[in-house]
Amino acid sequence: MILILSDLHLPNTPSPLRDRFLAFLDGPARAAEAVYLLGDLFEYWIGDREGLADYAAEAAALQRLRASGVRLYLQHGNRDFMLGRRFAKAAGLELLADPLIVDLAGTPTLLSHGDIWCTDDLAYQRWRRFSRNPLAQFIYRRLPRTWRQGVAGKARSGSAHKPVAILDVNPQAIEQAFAVSGVTRIIHGHTHRPDTHALQVNGRAVERLVLSDWHEAHCEYLEVDAAGLRRRRLP
């Protein structure tokens, strides 16, 4: 059994969401073969040093889960794309490329955070290319903490006044992703619009599953095995 989740947006202050994630790691995740975290696990990320201090409990719980034999994978989101190898090593996480084809219970599946397909948001795509540049990240890591927090805060508020339509994935971008990858299933998060979409691409029946973001009253993950896919909620 494989579990997949995204968009928890865990804050760096005490929160019921953090408690629910720890309960997930010490509960349902223990029965899994692997857990895939598809981005925006954290609300924002200004550096591994600060992250290891702010999220010590999460890093320890992830490491315990990995030590129990559960494989842990993480793709970067648009909020925590600066998460680096130092935190990943401490938490027992393997960082994955985005997008990436993985075999899920015998079905090749394209996994992604999902923001790469929001191509109608041209300003965000420019920011995404810039913020992933190694030189830009090198400079950012050397800024004072307050400056880095300011940049992160500005990036978080950037989508607040954008038209809703451009915040979703572009249909043509999705069709191209199916065509290029050759898979019949895509799973992603980012848009906060959980749903399952049945599509036809080049005469093939395909499906796109959008993961749910987490709220205090709704913490959902996807369960995948040979019997199919099921959306589960923490009690």
Image (cartoon, rainbow, N blue to C red):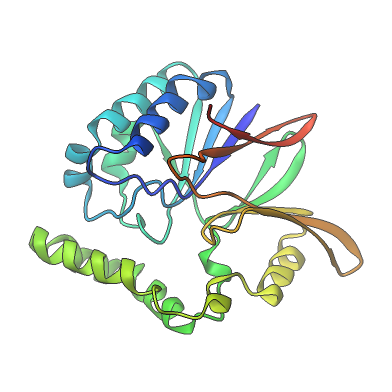
Q: Is residue 209 visible?
A: no
Q: Which quadrant: the N terminus?
A: top right
Q: Is residue 154 visible?
A: yes
Left or right position of 119 against 72: right
Residue 47, image x, y percentages: 21, 52
Left or right position of 164 against 225: left
Q: Residue at x 30, y 49 (%)?
A: 84
Left or right position of 52 against 164: left
Q: Residue at x 57, y 18 (%)?
A: 31
Q: Residue at x 77, y 55 (%)?
A: 207
178 or 44, which lies in front? 44
Which quadrant of the structure image shows residue 128? bottom left
The answer to whether residue 125 is above or below residue 203 is below
The answer to whether residue 12 is above or below residue 196 is above
Which quadrant of the structure image shows residue 193? bottom right
The answer to whether residue 171 is above or below residue 186 is below
Left or right position of 160 against 234: left
83 or 114, which lies in front? 114
Residue 206, image x, y percentages: 81, 57
24 or 94, which lies in front? 24
Furthest residue toward top: 68
Furthest residue toward front: 217
